[in-house]
């Protein structure tokens, strides 16, 4: 994964489609990395991504890249209109909620922890879906907000002795502010350049957490972060996780059907048309970034109290791709995709990790799922059981 990331960095810094640019970028990055190892050893974790961030901020299309042509066509995602929940889906949701509420009556401790983790991860996935699907902005560094929320809550508890309730408010607030800073730079780009800039900022945040050992604990992480006494019971904490995560998911769904959500999708479908009718495209995308970061931080905040600790992995590249893969598994055109994808990802990971060569088996299963369900699991079944046979919009960004 690190080799792939390095190759992407070289191509993006040089400029997409520019062979001389890639050569120049490889030369510059190689020299800077060598000097960093010699004079500033602490910079080796982040030098390459820091250079990429600086280059993309100054030259949005790389050193020798050319600006992308103005897009006159409507986004492909515009062909998948967002729809409110049907009666069938509302009934299904009510049944699922009833099952989750009654789950502690017949489930053991491990099952409660697993379902709670799926719910928290689903909220993080939903926040990424919010900007990737309806928002049209692909992020490769969403773990910066999920892991950042976990670290924010943990550090407030560890250093300031903040109660859990206040920490759960401070974590999303801090991540909303961080998303405003990162998003201010990112919304000026689009496509691969935007995705790679989010990756660069995420890697910078990860490096800070790894190397600021006195404050963050470094590789040892932050330990001993437990819920308040009233939430120490596993059943009570299960309900707390379900309520917070479910409430966050429903809030994001609700936002998509407000004027803010409609304007956000208009910016995704056609930036030129949105600007022509008076929508400030960059500002709308910037606010969307902050909303996504806030809810990802909320997911990370409750997550750290369920685990009792947090480590740099929660802000790393692999964690970002875990979240992205879950969204894609569920379906980028389906509002229920993040929930279905997170359940499939965590459930399969827990099941397969008990056997030898589990990573190979898990990867093979993911490839098979992508081949069998190109629209995602939720997208496939949404199309399969659509009310109108032959409806070309089935499997779209509808709530099913």
Image: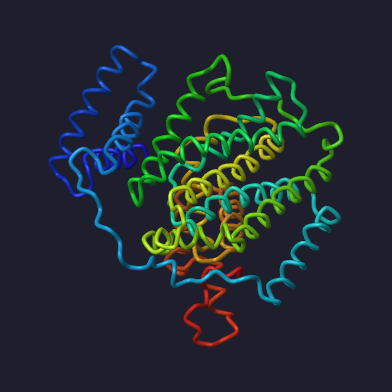
Q: Is residue 323 above or below residue 216?
A: below
Q: How is the image coloured?
A: rainbow
The N terminus sits in image quarter: top left
Q: Please give the name of the residue rendered at 72% of the width and 45% of the height, measured from the top-left corner.
A: 113
Q: Is residue 3 above or below residue 219?
A: below
Q: Please give the name of the residue rendered at 30% of the width and 61% of the height, measured from the top-left corner.
A: 71
The residue lying furthest to the left in this view is 20
In this rendering, position of residue 188 left or right of residue 167:
left
The residue lying furthest to the bottom in this view is 389
In this rendering, position of residue 107 left or right of residue 11:
right
Count of numbered circles in the view: 0
Which of 231/177 is in front? 177
Q: Please give the name of the residue rendered at 42% of the width and 64% of the height, measured from the top-left corner.
A: 269
Which of 346/327 is in front? 327
Q: Is residue 307 above or below residue 223?
A: below
The C terminus sits in image quarter: bottom right
Q: Position of residue 396 (x, y in %)?
A: 51, 71
Q: Position of residue 319 (x, y in %)?
A: 50, 41
In this rendering, position of residue 191 left or right of residue 172:
left
Q: Position of residue 398 (x, y in %)?
A: 57, 70
Q: Position of residue 154 (x, y in %)?
A: 66, 28
Q: Is residue 128 above or below residue 256?
A: above
Which of 363/144 is in front? 144
């Amino acid at each position: 994964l690190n080799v792939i990331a390095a190759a992407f960095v070289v191509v993006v810094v040089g400029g997409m489609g520019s062979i001389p640019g890639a050569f120049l970028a490889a030369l510059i990055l190689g020299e800077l990395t060598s000097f960093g190892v010699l004079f500033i050893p602490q910079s080796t974790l982040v030098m390459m991504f820091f250079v990429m961030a600086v280059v993309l901020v100054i030259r949005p299309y790389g050193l020798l890249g050319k600006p992308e042509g103005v897009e006159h066509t409507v986004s492909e995602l515009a062909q998948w209109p967002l729809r409110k929940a049907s009666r069938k889906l509302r009934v299904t949701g009510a049944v699922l909620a009833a099952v989750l509420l009654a789950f502690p009556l017949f489930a053991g401790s491990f099952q409660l922890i697993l379902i709670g983790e799926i719910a928290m991860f689903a909220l993080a996935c939903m926040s990424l879906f919010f900007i990737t699907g309806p928002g049209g902005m692909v992020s490769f560094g969403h773990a910066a907000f999920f892991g950042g929320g976990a670290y924010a809550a943990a550090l407030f508890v560890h250093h300031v002795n903040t109660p859990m309730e206040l920490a759960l408010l401070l974590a999303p607030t801090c991540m909303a502010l961080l998303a405003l800073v990162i998003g201010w730079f990112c919304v000026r780009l689009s496509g691969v350049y935007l995705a790679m800039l989010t990756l660069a900022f995420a890697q910078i945040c990860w490096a800070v957490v790894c190397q600021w050992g006195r404050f963050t604990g470094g590789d040892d992480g932050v330990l001993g972060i437990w819920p308040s006494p009233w939430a120490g019971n596993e059943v009570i904490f299960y309900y707390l996780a379900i309520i917070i995560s479910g409430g966050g998911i429903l809030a994001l769904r609700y936002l998509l059907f407000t004027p803010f959500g409609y304007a956000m999708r208009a910016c995704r479908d056609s930036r030129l048309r949105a600007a022509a009718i008076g929508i400030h495209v960059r500002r709308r995308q910037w606010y969307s970034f902050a909303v996504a970061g806030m809810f990802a931080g909320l997911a990370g905040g409750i997550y750290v109290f369920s685990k009792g600790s947090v480590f740099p992995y929660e802000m790393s590249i692999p964690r970002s791709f875990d979240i992205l893969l879950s969204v894609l598994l569920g379906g980028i055109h389906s509002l229920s995709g993040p929930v279905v994808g997170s359940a499939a990802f965590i459930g399969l990971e827990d099941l397969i990790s008990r056997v030898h060569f589990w990573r190979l088996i898990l990867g093979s299963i993911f490839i098979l799922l992508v081949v069998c369900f190109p629209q995602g699991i939720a997208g496939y079944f949404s199309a399969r059981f659509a009310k109108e046979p032959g409806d070309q919009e089935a499997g779209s960004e509808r709530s099913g």
